[in-house]
Image (cartoon, coloured by chain):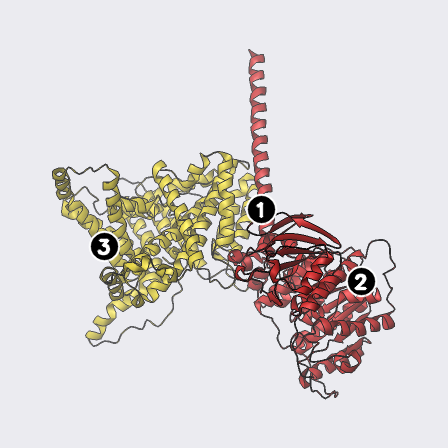
Chain colours: A red, B yellow
Amino acid sequence: MKVIIKKNEIQNGILLGLKSLKNMLRVVAFLLITVILLHTWVIWFIPKHHDGNRIMETFYAQPENSIDVLVVGSSHTFIDVNTGMLWENYGIPSFVIGGSLQPFWNSYYFIKEAMNYQQPQLIVLEAFACDVDFDYGEEGMVINNVSGMRMNMNKLEAIRASVTDVDGIIDFSLLFRQYHTRYDELTIDDVAPEYADPVRFENNKGFYDYLGTYPITRPVCDMDDEVVPMPNKEEYYYRLIIEYCQEQGIPLMIMVSPDGAYNPLSRGHYNYAREIAEEYGVEFVDYNEYYDEIGLNFETDFGDIGHLNYLGNRKFTSVLGEHLVDQYGLTDRRSDTSGLYDSWHENYLYLEERVDNYLLSQTEDLDEYIQRMNDLSDNYEIIIYLSEYRYVTEEMRRYLGLYSITATRPFDSRRYLINGNITTTLVADDYGLYYEEYLGDHHLSVSVEGICFDNTFVDESYYTGVCIVVIDRHNQRVADSVVIDSDMVYRYEAES
Amino acid sequence: MLFNSIQFALFFAVVLIVFYVLPPRVRVWWILLASLFFYCYKSPEEPIGEQSYYLFAAILITWITAVVMDLIPSEGKLKVLRGILLAEGLIADFGMLIYFKYTKFFIELINPSIVENGGQAVSTDFNLLMPLGISFFIFTSTGYLIDVYRCKYHAEKNPLYVALFTSFFPCIMSGPIERGDHLIPQLKKLHTVKVINVDRMSNGIFLIIWGLFAKMVIADRIAMIVDNVYGHYYNYGSVELIFASICYSIQIYCDFMSYSTIAMGCAKMMGIDVFDNFNAPYLSLSVKEFWRRWHISLSSWLRDYVYFPLGGSRCSKIRKHLNVLITFLVSGFWHGAGLNFIIWGGMHGIIQMIDELTAPVRKKINDITHAKTESFGYRFGKGLITFAFVDIAWVYFRITDFHLANEIVRRMFSRPNLWVLFNDGLYNLGLDRKEFNILFIAVLALIIMDLAKKDKEKSIGDIMTAQPWWFRWAAIIILFFSVLTFGIYGPGFDPAAFIYLNF
């Protein structure tokens, strides 16, 4: 009898234990699923600002201790300091942590945060912040400047410096409270950021060319020595940055980027900043004193009133790069074969191709267009849809002939894919061309004849002659799409 | 500290973790400490807010009065002493309530008479900061005192339990109004609550998230329509005004139900069951039934401590109707110091009188017409009429100006503009099409929940507990992400306080 009771007790015990284990497993599974979904939710919903969270995401993706020059400051940094050129011409692996109207308190905590991951040989602080007059930025700016940082004391300190009260600290620490309402504006950029921006991570160094052109008049400003104090809070953090860099033993250069809105008041602020820099024995360069040395053309080299464009930033970066090499004796890393700096070359290629794509998309002249297509590297593919051959111009026929694309009948309709010197005939249905391919993890689809390719549309009603879609394989973008009809080049604005 | 705030989320997480980490015997102290912190803490500069003293006073009065009362025999000559003690307790408790809630109202009421008789009007230019939730903890305390007086149960001698019973943080701000014989025994058994009880925990989590969903996704979203339409009623016709009044019915239900549901969930996670305050009230087939399903803890309080002492239904018919009317007038007055609340209460009282008086006539008509009273159509019609009445009564609840409320109701029936239903006009009432669709889906979820609740006559938490575990957890995850995404919260949003906190 006793034995039976004991046996039952053991059985009950085991059953109870199994039940508890089952429950525990369910709870663990539930928590795991919730965490995974939450992680995905955050990735989807967090705003994707180039001068906000993205710049820090890409910073965290950099190989450890690979950045030699860290550029920190306002929008003038990520628009004017071309990281691709610094690498390609001077072998300087650099990274830009810049935000629109980024105040010194944000720059200070960015620098501190950066030191956890990198040991730069030089920090370049861009000084536009001393010319702005606010102690607390607007909400959107605060989000931009803190949202990308990982949750740690630097982030909390940056938030504390950016807001006025405890509620603000809670709001900006728990940023989902700000961006959860984005459910009606989500796009492919949000749910598959690597598709929307393939160089988002390691290959991105924080810099983006301004592609437009905005003619401005050369700022009229007496380069006198009048001094106007900067706001107290800015000065406090400006000094903190200098002191911190000196404590860390990292050389600091403070510079002012060429600015079309440069004026006597800003000059006064910069003079004040220069005085402080000299007080600490730190170099301060105001590049607004060197327009001629840089060779700036105010008709063509600015993207807006304050920032340089792809032409201007190359000129400015040349001068800056030369100065950095001469003054700070930075090591040229181009000969390094360890692979540590490969991403800088990728960054350079990306930036160059981005400009090439822009220029291609701006070309109106047919001869020039064909010339640009001929010059394209193997990184490009060209899809050609021949609609009605009778409409194709002689120049275009010659170009097509180079790739053995010929049609003898006036109503030939064919599709070709040109990659380098190789031409492939594509098979598609009779109603248009649909080209789809998987590039690694990145999905790319191109459609023609009224159907969306990338996010560009061709209007069916114009669709005669040759339709050309130029695909930048390297950057996984449709570089341009045009229809050439007789002697006209039609281009359609991208719809998003 | 609102239930839908980050502060509360952090507070409750800490309370819960410490609750289960502490030695079981200390739990009751911990919950009391947490409750007092929840109610009393104001700011680092003023840790204990002024309103806390009235809670302390209520606790002290309740404990001492009940203990002393319990020492006096309920029979014999000394019985009168019990009555005196009860009166003292009630006067002290209700005195606080009346002072804070009704002083201005009474002054404004008597001022015209004073002026008419040549006197000078009493100034109402003062600000009495009403302690939050005073109506709830005073009703909790007084209910307890009356129960002890009636010898329903003995007074709790340990002040710790009385303090916790009165100030239990899930219930103190907005109910449910608990009873001594329901909550105190559970508080005494807090040390026996097991740490790992997946069903109870998931039940609690579901209730909390469902409450947050009702508040943040439905109530605060639908409020935008209500505020806009009632705020600019002169711009709208019948359809918009009827629609807005339906929206307000949903808003106030979700608002109040959500608070009670979150309270239930929080308590459940600590091993305590508090009353389920709502049971699909808008699916009622009569106003009487509505009050059995709406704010159940208040309705039962009024029944036990107002209606029954007045004689209840065991008296003449006229007296019975009068008792009903008085009870509902008290209910209206409890909701707020304003004529509109009294009118609202009166409407509910009168409609029940009419309902009862016309019952034989209706029965006769049904008999003559051979009405299929059990059919879906008949019941649906009854439900619709009940909802329509409750809906119109809510207009008087929402609009403090009686004449304005009358005007809105008049417009609801005098400005037909059915085309608004077909020309996207409803999307211009405060929510655009996307927001409207979200609201529509959320309200559908609410209806499904209420249908299930009415069908099973169980709390929503219990219904979910009876479901397979994967279904339960999936529902929690879906609701959680719905709240996270579609909830109305964050900077730029002024968190609409739970409406019932004001009462």
Q: Quadrant of the C terminus of chain A?
A: bottom right
Seen at 80% across and 56% down, the residue is A342
In this view, the residue farthest toward the front is A409
Marks 1 and 2 share the same chain: yes
Instruction: Give the percent coordinates (x, y) of residue B399.
Output: 30, 62
Seen at 56% across and 26% down, the residue is A16
Task: Quickly name the residue at label 2.
Answer: A93
Q: What is the secondary structure assignment of the residue under circle 3?
A: helix
In the image, which is nearer the foreground, mark 1 or mark 2? Answer: 2
Task: Quickly name the residue at label 1.
Answer: A37
Where is B187 relative to B340, above or below? above
Q: Residues within 10 Å of mark 2 (few under 14, many from 20)?
A: many
CA gap between label 1 and label 3 equals 49 Å
CA gap between label 1 and label 2 equals 37 Å
| Amino acid type of the residue that numbered disc 3 sits on in the rendered structure | Met
| Amino acid type of the residue that numbered disc 1 sits on in the rendered structure | Leu
Task: Quickly name the residue at label 3.
Answer: B347
In the image, which is nearer the foreground, mark 1 or mark 3? Answer: 1
